[in-house]
Image (cartoon, helix red, strand yellow):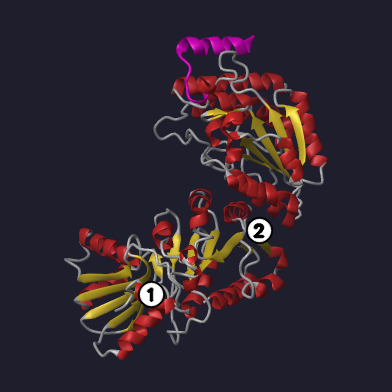
């Protein structure tokens, strides 16, 4: 996903000369294509994410379209107040990019588990939040974020995630995607759980539907309404704490649809996510997902 | 108007604002007044009638709690009306009790300490990359230098040769809950900036000639300049000077009238 991101960012930077990339000293063997082609629009600020985000705000105040890049919690939680106050309150054109969603850096430990970021980033006004499900989604969302003038958060996996979509016709900010049409139960995924869910559904012949919902904010309420009218059960699955994450967003959106008179009621919703805990043993991403109970 | 008279007008306006709104932070607004008076009395490149003028210098008030000083300076300079100024802190006023970028002439909202220095680095970096001659001034409090984020910026600016960046420390020696020396000593502050690669200058922050000389010297420097301005909290009103209490307290009617009288003398 990170490779898809940087390739797309390079393409977009060829068209938009305002694109500026900052890193907090991470991105070895990832960022080089951008650095080599646009040295005047790149800076490694050092291991200093608060400063990076403030600098991004300053650059954006002078017209740049700024991307900040680092891994896991460093470009997000470490500098959450700079994101909230300097970037989002001033509604500046800064895109925060984090690599290593969920347990992507599994064995590196809790410091590198990005498992609370959705909950924190989505509560900040003006911020758009996206967690792509595969490299194709990541590419398209990178383009959309370059085109959007305002704060965005791009929550990427790591390297080597397989493609799930053969092609995507349209994916605009706020769109969800139907991956498999089914009956009875719809599985809604956010981020790189998409591949797991797709494989599970194809291997088990229960006829579940599958929807990839990369945009946590704004959420695709129209798609949720359509799903509610077609299915009796919904399962959300995410590599994030249950509290404040994707499943919470879906529940809130359905409640608002009912409150707003758009739906009479909504299906039963089972939320699969991390049950309010840290994991402090080593293991692969799949192993840690299993320990957290992220299974359909 | 000369800068000394301008400073008197700013001080009286600050006092009127905090008295009328029963607001806090008068001490830290009065301590930086002389620096604002020199900056905005024809030194900094800004256009009051055109606040977003594209070639303007940028002034960021990192110590956002001292906003009455900046608001008064801007209103007296013509960025917005005195009528609007006196809506300060009232319902629906855009003049919040921490510096707000919704106010004409204010570049950045502040209030949480340790933010503006990095934003100033970003602006200075941008002007350098665009080969623009605009300058960036960041006014910091002494207490907020406790924030680690400032030291990230202090490390950054000289490395990237941001000679278009001027940091001004309003060193009034009193922070929120005690003296700087007791809470978290900054000394030797000038040596710290110097060792980080800054052109560190110490001045009397109430001496207008010294302020202007330091600003002029900063514009000649090839490295970023830190002006350590030794100031007095509550400067200009004897019963407010050097007193922690005036970080919080708002003057009574008698105190307000006495304060105005002192400044008029």
Expressed as whole percent of the image width and height from the top left, the position of residue B255 reads 50, 12
Within 10 Å of the Cα at label 2, are there few (<14), some (14-19), or many (20+) other Cα atoms?
many
Q: Which residue is mark 1?
A: A289
Q: Is residue B14 above or below residue B60?
A: above
Task: Name which residue lies at 75% across and 38% down.
Answer: B191
Q: Which residues are magenta?
A: B247-265
Which of discs 2 and 1 lies nearer the camera? The answer is 1
Task: Name which residue lies at 77% across and 34% down.
Answer: B201
Q: Could you give the CA–CA distance between mark 2 and mark 1, rounded to whole angstroms?
A: 33 Å
Q: Quadrant of the rendered structure where residue B202 is?
A: top right
Main SS class of the magenta portion in the image: helix
Residue A283: tell me if it is visible. Answer: yes
In the displayed structure image, the side of residue A161 where residue B221 appears, left or right? right
Q: Secondary structure at mark 2?
A: loop
In the displayed structure image, the side of residue A270 where residue B260 appears, left or right? right
Q: Chain of mark 1?
A: A
Expressed as whole percent of the image width and height from the top left, the position of residue A54 reads 59, 51
Q: Which residue is mark 2?
A: A45
Expressed as whole percent of the image width and height from the top left, the position of residue A152 reads 49, 61
Q: Is residue B44 above or below residue A15?
A: above
Q: Is residue A64 magenta?
A: no
Residue A105: tell me if it is visible. Answer: no
Q: Nearer the viewer, residue A250 or A293?
A: A293
Q: Is residue B212 above or below residue A165?
A: above
Q: Nearer the viewer, residue B66 or A284?
A: A284
Within 10 Å of the Cα at label 1, are there few (<14), some (14-19), or many (20+) other Cα atoms?
many
Mark nearer the N terminus (2 vs 1): 2
Q: Is residue B253 magenta?
A: yes
Image quadrant occupied by the N terminus of chain B = top right
Q: Secondary structure at mark 1?
A: helix
Q: Quadrant of the rendered structure where residue A191 is?
A: bottom left
Task: Name which residue lies at 41% across and 79% down.
Answer: A286
């Amino acid at each position: 996903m990170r490779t898809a991101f940087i390739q797309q960012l390079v393409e977009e930077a060829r068209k938009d000369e305002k694109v500026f990339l900052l890193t907090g000293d991470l991105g070895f063997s990832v960022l080089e294509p951008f650095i080599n082609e646009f040295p005047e629009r790149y800076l490694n600020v050092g291991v200093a994410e608060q400063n990076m985000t403030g600098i991004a705000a300053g650059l954006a105040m002078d017209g740049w379209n700024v991307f900040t890049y680092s891994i896991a919690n460093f470009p997000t939680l470490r500098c959450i107040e700079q994101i909230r106050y300097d970037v989002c309150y001033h509604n500046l054109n800064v895109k925060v990019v984090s690599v290593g969603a969920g347990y992507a850096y599994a064995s590196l430990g809790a410091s590198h588990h990005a498992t609370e970021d959705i909950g924190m980033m989505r509560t900040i006004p003006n911020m758009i939040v996206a967690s792509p499900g595969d490299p194709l989604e990541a590419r398209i969302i990178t383009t959309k974020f370059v085109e959007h003038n305002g704060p965005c958060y791009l929550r990427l996996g790591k390297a080597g995630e397989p493609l799930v979509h053969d092609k995507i016709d349209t994916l605009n900010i706020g769109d969800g995607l139907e991956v498999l049409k089914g009956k009875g139960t719809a599985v809604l995924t956010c981020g790189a759980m998409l591949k797991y869910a797709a494989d599970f559904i194809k291997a088990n012949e229960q006829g579940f539907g599958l929807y990839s919902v990369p945009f946590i904010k704004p959420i695709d309420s129209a798609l949720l309404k359509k799903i509610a009218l077609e299915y009796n059960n919904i399962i959300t699955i995410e590599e994030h704490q249950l509290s404040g994450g994707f499943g919470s967003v879906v529940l809130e959106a359905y409640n608002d649809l009912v409150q707003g008179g758009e739906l009479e009621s909504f299906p039963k919703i089972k939320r699969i996510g991390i049950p309010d805990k840290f994991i402090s043993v080593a293991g692969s991403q799949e192993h840690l997902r299993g320990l957290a109970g992220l299974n359909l | 108007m000369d800068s000394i008279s301008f400073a008197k007008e700013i001080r009286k306006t600050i006092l009127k604002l905090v008295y009328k709104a029963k607001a806090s932070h008068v001490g830290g607004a009065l301590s930086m007044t002389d620096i604002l008076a020199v900056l905005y009395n024809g030194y900094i490149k800004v256009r009051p009638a055109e606040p977003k003028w594209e070639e303007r210098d940028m002034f960021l008030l990192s110590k956002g709690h001292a906003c009455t000083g900046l608001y008064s300076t801007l209103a007296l300079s013509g960025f917005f009306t005195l009528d609007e100024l006196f809506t300060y802190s009232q319902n629906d006023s855009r003049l919040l009790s921490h510096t707000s970028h919704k106010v004409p002439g204010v570049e950045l909202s502040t209030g949480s300490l340790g933010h503006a220095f990095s934003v100033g680095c970003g602006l200075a970096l941008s002007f350098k990359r665009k080969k623009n001659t605009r300058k960036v001034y960041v006014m910091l409090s002494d207490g907020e230098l406790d924030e680690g984020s400032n030291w990230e910026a202090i490390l950054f600016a000289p490395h990237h040769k941001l000679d278009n960046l001027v940091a001004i420390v309003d060193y009034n020696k009193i922070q929120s809950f005690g003296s700087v020396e007791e809470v978290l000593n900054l000394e030797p502050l000038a040596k710290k900036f110097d060792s980080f690669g800054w052109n560190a200058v110490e001045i009397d922050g109430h001496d207008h000639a010294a302020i202007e000389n330091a600003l002029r010297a900063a514009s000649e420097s090839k490295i970023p300049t830190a002006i350590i301005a030794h100031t007095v909290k509550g400067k200009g009103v004897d019963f407010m000077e050097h007193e922690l209490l005036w970080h919080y307290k708002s003057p009574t009617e008698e105190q307000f009238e006495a304060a105005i009288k002192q400044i008029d003398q």
